[in-house]
Amino acid sequence: DQQVKQNSPSLSVQEGRISILNCDYTNSMFDYFLWYKKYPAEGPTFLISISSIKDKNEDGRFTVFLNKSAKHLSLHIVPSQPGDSAVYFCAAKTLASIQGAQKLVFGQGTRLTINP
Amino acid sequence: EAQVTQNPRYLITVTGKKLTVTCSQNMNHEYMSWYRQDPGLGLRQIYYSMNVEVTDKGDVPEGYKVSRKEKRNFPLILESPSPNQTSLYFCASSSITGGLAGLDEQFFGPGTRLTVL
């Protein structure tokens, strides 16, 4: 049972435009959400996160939006750059327990390609 | 440099031949975890450890063993590998006691690509 879902396996965007990556979750216990970026032959690296008490978090070109009622979050990248081409994983966890606060539940990933 | 290292990075083996993938971190993290990444499934947790001598099963533990005798090391053991364990494996670590619980970044190793023939 996939508790975190990324329904778009791939996304292609023109350089300079906005990239929007989507993620849905089913477990209402999740209260902290993260995006990880992964380049080939490397491990995932943390990109940005959001707590369930917020609906938006910005860090430079990256913004994550959270819609708790819809159990949906999205990552916006503006403007998109060729170096943003990577696989993006959405992840979620619950802060209610020490173990839950460490365990990341991942989506399937979306491969983003930025075209020059 | 703060990092998580894994060895080997690539491994091709045959069914039934025991193997160990090592994982080491230099950040004095209490929490360590193993994930496997498969197409269409994302990363799934195999085993985790909250501290030395404390380990527990994740979501897909069948066919794997782990040990945590030292804080920095968390090896993954496949006693009798099978082709369905062909995958990309990641080790990760994070701090439990540092900063706000659960909000510290989890650091990942570079991955080990395992093929079982």
Image (cartoon, coloured by chain):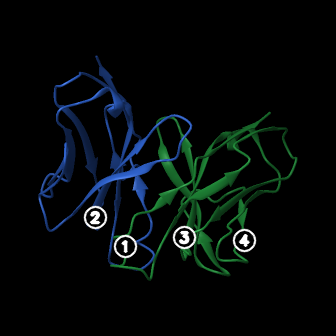
Q: Colour of chain A?
A: blue
- The residue located at (31%, 55%) in the rendering is A34
Amino acid found under the numbered disc labelled 3? Met
The residue identified by callout 2 is: A32
Amino acid found under the numbered disc labelled 4? Ser
Q: CA distance from mark 4 to mark 1?
A: 23 Å
Disc 3, SS? loop
The residue identified by callout 1 is: B102
Q: CA distance from mark 2 to mark 1?
A: 9 Å
Question: For this rendering, which residue is in front, B115 or A27?
Answer: B115
Chain letter, green in picture: B
Chain to which the residue tagged by mark 2 belongs: A
Q: Position of residue A68 (x, y in %)?
A: 15, 58
Decide if residue A67 is in sight here: yes
Is disc 4 in the same subunit as disc 2? no
Q: Is residue B6 above or below residue A101?
A: above
Choose the circle earlier in sequence order: 1 or 3.
Answer: 3
Tell me whether circle 2 and circle 1 mark residues in contact (CB < 8 Å).
Answer: yes
